Amino acid sequence: MTPGVDGQTFDGMTLARLDRLVQSVTESRYRPRPVRRVYIPKGNGKMRPLGIPTADDRIVQEAARMILAAIYEPVFSQHSHGFRAGRSCHTALEEIRNTWTGVKWLIEVDVRGFFDNIDHDILLGLLARRIDDPLFIDLIGTMLKAGCVDDWKFERTYSGTPQGGVISPLLANIYLHELDLFMEEMRAGFDKGVKRRANPAYVAHSRQIAVLRKEIDAIRADGADRSEVRVRLARIEAVKQDRHKLSSVDPMDPDFRRLRYCRYADDFLVGVIGSKADAVRIMADIQRFLADRLNLAVSPEKTGVRDASKGSPFLGFHVCAFTLRSAGTMAGRPKVGGGTRRVLRRPTRGEYQAVGATGSGSMRSAGARSLATST
């Protein structure tokens, strides 16, 4: 019921009105009206501009959106969560919780004025790759260039797609699908190794414990003084306490690297298991791709490489790595000579949690624990 520049709403919509609209589109006589510019407050105190199309334009945009969705939804990335059926901020944060354990560096990239700076020529060129229909491409072009009315003044639109338009979110996803493909290609070239190498210090402690256990078995077999057993059990406990302070694998193994990526509309976060130099290089490659291929600039003050333990803002939450404080879980381990024994498995380090922007608590999904990964 929100009117556009013509003051009309869907109230009193008739089939005759729809027929006239269909005929104007099929005969290429349809011309979108400028959007009505309104402003709504943002969380940081600034104002966000919205473009309100007319009721007729919303109908045409929805028809075009349905066509584009049928074409692009099957090929969109699994790491894209914004404005898609069955996906949301929650699914984006769940992906981070479930797959980002062990990430050491977070790359935060803030695209400056994304919706206002989408290059029309680039977007129409991307559409033409998959849609062999010049008339349909021209229809999208007229929507993009319809202009806007702000405080009763008409302004032409040379770039961008208005937030508030029915088709704008999907066009934004189509535009940034190129970034999704670039990140997937980068990930394929960056990922390395099957698993991290063992931590030599941890292995040495484990061997020391194994030697002491063998000595205990020999003492018991010979029927020697049980005090010798107690001495070795005390040594085993001391070595275990020292081993508990160590990681079982080398967290900075140069032969093990992983790249993680998650996007919600123009907000995206990149995680790196590797060196800080790797993360800095990846950030530079992303900035170069955005500038060269999509004609987008980033905000230097909001872009950078963050230590994962300190975290980074994402979708209104503060995403960070942490170590569970639980005692651990029981797991089976093979015994020397056959069989298994129950051991206490330590909590995973580098799990991920998303804390509310106020820091008041963790986000919870239905019936789930606080947002943290466990891979």
Image (cartoon, rainbow, N blue to C red):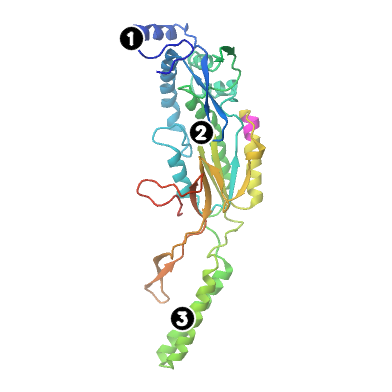
Residue under label 2:
265
Q: Is residue 43 above or below residue 198?
A: above
Main SS class of the magenta portion in the image:
helix
Residue 340 sits inside the magenta stretch: no
Q: Are discs 2 and 1 less than 8 Å apart at CB?
A: no
Observer-nearest residue: 157 or 129? 157
Disc 2 residue type (three-letter): Ala
Picture quadrant of residue 281? top right
In-front residue for pair 47/89: 47
What residue type is disc 1 on?
Answer: Thr
Q: On the image, numbered disc 3 is attached to which residue?
A: 213
* 334 displayed left or right of 45: left
Secondary element type, mark 2: loop
Mark 1–mark 3 contact, CB under 8 Å? Answer: no
Q: Which region shows up in magenta?
A: 289-293
Closest to the observer, 357 or 256? 357
Q: Quadrant of residue 150?
A: top right
Sequence-wise, which precedes: disc 2 or disc 3? 3
Of the numbered discs in the image, which one, if any, rests on residue 270? none
